[in-house]
Image (cartoon, helix red, strand yellow):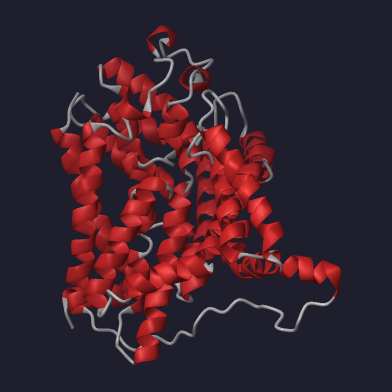
Amino acid sequence: MSFSGRFERVFRALIPGPFSLAVALTFGVLTAAVTGFVPPEETLPSHGQRILRSWYFGLWDPPMLVFAFQMMLILVLGHVLALSRPADKLMRRFTARASNTASAAALVCAVCVVLGFLNWGLALIFGAVLARKIAEASAAEGRKLNYPLIAAAGYTGMMVWHGGLSGSALIKASEPGHLTALTAGSTRIQAALIPAEIPLSETVFSPMNLAVSAALLTVLPAIGYLAGKRRTGAIPEVTPINLSLDIRAPEGLAEKTEHHYLPAFLLGALALITAALLGFSKGDSGSYGGPDFINLIFLGLGLTAHGSLHRFAAAVRSAVTGTAGILIQFPLYFGIMAVLKSSGMGAAISDFFVAVSTPGTYRILTFFSAGFINILVPSGGGQWMIQGPIIIDASQKMGLALPQSILAMAYGDQITNMLQPFWALPLLGITGLKARDILPYTLYFMAGGIAIFITALIIFRA
């Protein structure tokens, strides 16, 4: 057996399930916070009680629960759109080009990188459904396929997203006044030197980020293709995804209305027209990339694509099961984030990397610190709230360009998604695989991404 084969076998045997990992991280962070970060003015019992209180309020923090619901809706509505007939026809065109594992992995990677730059939810769901469709076609034709590798390729959009148009830190930094509000009350940061906003032209569309995106679009499909050449796999054991539809003829006005195209078309058109008005309104809170705005578009497209309220509701029933793991795990990670904040652990991790940094190494160490924090808090927005003020402070003191420092954090946040299986839960639900099946292959993509990101952070210096 080759080294890569032994690595994959050992990794599958050792990797825990996503829920087990969330529980282990919860106990690990709580233990470290209670025992290792006791302020001089507090006793251990009172400190422990304060940490547990912060954990409790973090679990059920109302704004974070709203955020969780927004994220779940993105995944559900994106999945609903992917289950529509127009999307199925589009995917059939892609599957026709995937004649073997190598070509399928390269194709899925390329699609997910492009979609990941546009929107993370669309990339995650489209990549998962495309991987499933390719497996269904292979099973129908009796062709061998390395299904876990194709599913891993469908996850690669999550190592692109934070440098794209839906990147949390980049979007928040572009909002007027956000950076000042984020650092309010800090005695270490010179408020007068904080920019009012950082436009997307300096982050998403900067020369460095465009070069990184182009490199990812080239290298990741190549990794998928080469890995596919070495892995033949087996005939996938999958059956076509069918919507649970009531096949009897509708009776009465109410049922006939649900099956008619007009109500779905009117509501879908209303949603899309509203999205267009919001999108072209300057200064409106429904700017591109916001979760509510994206959900409005997905709702409109899903209703019009399915053609009836009946089919749309059936697609929702099929799609909602993919968010079950996220529903229960999101609060656990919110609790971890609250403990990291209240105990000072999150700041201590970032401060450590700042302390050992020089102007030449700071962005690279920020990249690695962001990757580590993402394992503990797999939320780009949550991580920005923890690490953002420290990045602003360090960039001021070292005289570094803030946009590139923020991108370094974004790159680190997204790269360890290939190691942290939380956001893979919808993909696993759609493909029917387990985290330990795909993670050995996502690490190959992760290695390629690390090389690209570090190279860019070294070459592009402002």
Residue situated in front as seen by the camera: 402 or 259:
259
In the rendered view, tell whether residue 353 sits above or below residue 374: above
The residue at 62%/49% (across/down) is: 269
Residue situated in front as seen by the camera: 188 or 316:
316
In the rendered view, tell whether residue 143 sits above or below residue 428: below
Which quadrant would residue 313 be assigned to in this image?
A: bottom right
Q: Quadrant of the N terminus?
A: bottom left
The residue at 37%/53% (across/down) is: 115
Total marks shown come to: 0
Answer with left or right where residue 404 lies relative to residue 47. Answer: left
Residue situated in front as seen by the camera: 182 or 78:
78
Answer with left or right where residue 85 lies relative to residue 73. Answer: left
**Residue 435 shows up from this direction:** no
Answer with left or right where residue 436 lies relative to residue 73. Answer: left
Judged from this view, the residue extending furthest toward the left is 459
**Residue 244 shows up from this direction:** yes
In the rendered view, tell whether residue 256 sits above or below residue 62: below
Looking at the picture, how far across and down is residue 259, in whole percent? 72, 70
The residue at 31%/76% (across/down) is: 96
Q: Quadrant of the C terminus?
A: top left
Looking at the picture, how far across and down is residue 302, in whole percent? 58, 58
The residue at 36%/30% (across/down) is: 200
Looking at the picture, how far across and down is residue 60, in whole percent? 69, 45
Judged from this view, the residue extending furthest toward the right is 252
In the rendered view, tell whether residue 246 sits above or below residue 393: below
